[in-house]
Amino acid sequence: MDTALVGAMAGVLGSLVGGSASVATTWIAQKTLNRRELMREEIKKREALYGEFIGECAKLLVDAFAHTLDQPDKLLPVYALINRVRLCASRAVLTEAEHLLARITEQYFAQNMTMEELRALVGSGDADPLRAFGEACRAELESIRTRI
């Protein structure tokens, strides 16, 4: 074989391998970047949804302490939200959301609380019925962040 031909073939093959490695590296880097961006968007979406659910539940809880359920349509927004949560949340978050909704419903059918009973509730360890849901949400979001 001709020495010049071997040299030319080696140069062409070297360029081909080098170019392929560069393309493969760029493709992997872009794929990883796209995955990270999708995960960040998912976190933002869930934070907004969970925040909206917490806000609606807080309003209903305060209302339930002082009123009975005279208009069942008050619960419609929170039922719509829990079904949106059901679409994307982990089992732990969904379980806590369902417990919170059950507590709100039970409170509406319980006797209205007096100011003294509310003060005693605040003084006890059960003052924040939203806490378990919030902690489940935080754990879920942290697990998503670790995958980024």
Image (cartoon, helix red, strand yellow):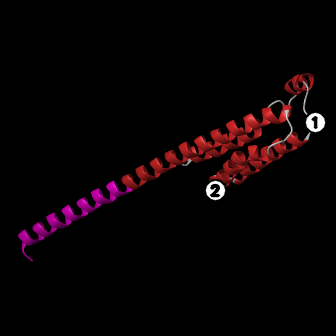
Query: Viewer-proximal residue, 43 or 74?
Result: 74
Q: Is residue 8 left or right of residue 22?
A: left
Q: Is residue 18 above or below residue 141?
A: below
Q: Is residue 114 above or below residue 13?
A: above
Quadrant of the snapshot with the N terminus:
bottom left
Q: Is residue 124 above or below residue 148?
A: above
Would you say residue 94 sits in the magenta stretch?
Answer: no
Q: Which residues are magenta?
A: 1-28
Q: Is residue 56 left or right of residue 148?
A: right
Q: Which residue is mark 2?
A: 87
Residue 129 can be seen, yes or no: no
Please name the amino acid that badge 1 sits on: Gln
Please name the amino acid that badge 2 sits on: Leu
Q: Which disc, if any, is residue 111? A: 1
Q: Nearer the viewer, mark 2 or mark 1?
A: 1
Query: Viewer-proximal residue, 132 or 87?
Result: 87
Q: SS class of the residue under badge 1?
A: loop
Residue visible at 73% across and 39% down in the picture: 57
Residue 1 can be seen, yes or no: yes
Q: Distance of mark 2 from mark 1, alpha carbons?
A: 34 Å
Q: SS class of the residue under badge 2?
A: helix
Number of residues whose C-alpha sits closer than 10 Å to that of mark 1, classed few (under 14), some (14–19) or many (20 or more): few
Would you say residue 18 sits in the magenta stretch?
Answer: yes
Residue visible at 47% across and 48% down in the picture: 36
Q: Position of residue 77 (x, y in %)?
A: 69, 46
Query: Viewer-proximal residue, 134 or 142?
Result: 134
Determine contact: label 2, label 1, CB under 8 Å: no
Query: Upstream in the sequence, badge 2 or badge 1?
Result: 2
Q: Quadrant of residue 125?
A: top right
Q: Position of residue 26 (x, y in %)?
A: 32, 54
